[in-house]
Amino acid sequence: MQHLRKRKLPTLSMAPMINCVFLLLIFFMVSTTFAPVPGLPVQLPPPQCFPPPDQKVIVVRIANPAPGETEGTILMSGTGPEAIVRTGEMFNHLLNAPEASKIRLTIMAERDVFHEQVVRVMDIAMRAGIDNIGFAIVR
C-alpha cells in the first residue's frame, strides 16, 4: 500500500502587504499639500455712522459670554429703558415695541459672541416683523 502524503496548501501572509499599504498611506498623507479652501467672497458695505438720535431704532447689544457660557448677555434699548433681555423674551419685547421704533434693528455684538446667537436674534426680529437689520461695531 502506498502512503499518500497530504499536500499542504500554500498560505499567503497578509502582514507584509498591510504594512506596505500603511506605509504608502502615510507617505501620501505627508507629501500631499492641501490648498486652503477660500471662504465665501463677501463685500461688506463701508462703515457708517450710528443713526442720528432723533431716528428711533431698536438697539440690541450682545456682550461677550462669560467663561464657560455659550451665550452672551443681551441688552435691548429702543423698546423702553435699556434692559437685560433673555432670548426667549425678546420676541415679545420686539412685538410690543412702538411702531415708530420698529423701523430698524441694530445689532452690536462683541468680539467673542458666537454667530449662532446673532443669527438667532436676527430670526426673532424677522418673526416680529422687523426686516431692516443693521450691524454696528463695538469698540
Image (cartoon, rainbow, N blue to C red):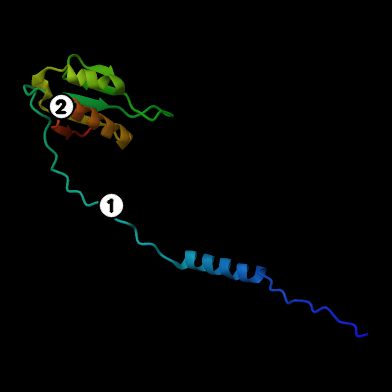
**Residue found at x 14% / y 39%:** 47
**Residue found at x 18% / y 20%:** 95
**Residue found at x 25% / y 21%:** 90
Of 56 and 2, which appears nearest the observer? 2
Of 11 and 83, which appears nearest the observer? 11
Residue 77 visible in image: no
Identify the residue position indicated by label 2 in the image.
Answer: 129
Whether residue 17 sits left or right of residue 37 in the image: it is: right
Quarter of the rendering occupied by the C terminus = top left
Q: Secondary structure at mark 2?
A: loop
Identify the residue position indicated by label 1 in the image.
Answer: 39
Residue reaching furthest to the front: 1
Which tag, 1 or 2, sits closer to the chain's start?
1
Q: Secondary structure at mark 1?
A: loop
Of 122 and 56, which appears nearest the observer? 122
Whether residue 53 sits left or right of residue 30 in the image: it is: left
Q: Is residue 33 above or below residue 53?
A: below
Mark 1 neighbour class, 10 Å CA radius: few under 14, some 14 to 19, many 20 or more: few
Q: CA distance from mark 1 to mark 2?
A: 31 Å
Name the image quarter holding residue 113.
Answer: top left
Whether the residues at callouts 1 and 2 have beta carbons within 8 Å, the answer is no
Q: Is residue 15 above or below residue 55?
A: below
Mark 2 neighbour class, 10 Å CA radius: few under 14, some 14 to 19, many 20 or more: few
The amino acid sitting under disc 1 is Gly
Name the image quarter holding residue 128.
Answer: top left
Q: Is residue 120 above or below residue 35?
A: above
Residue reaching furthest to the left: 54
Q: How many marks?
A: 2
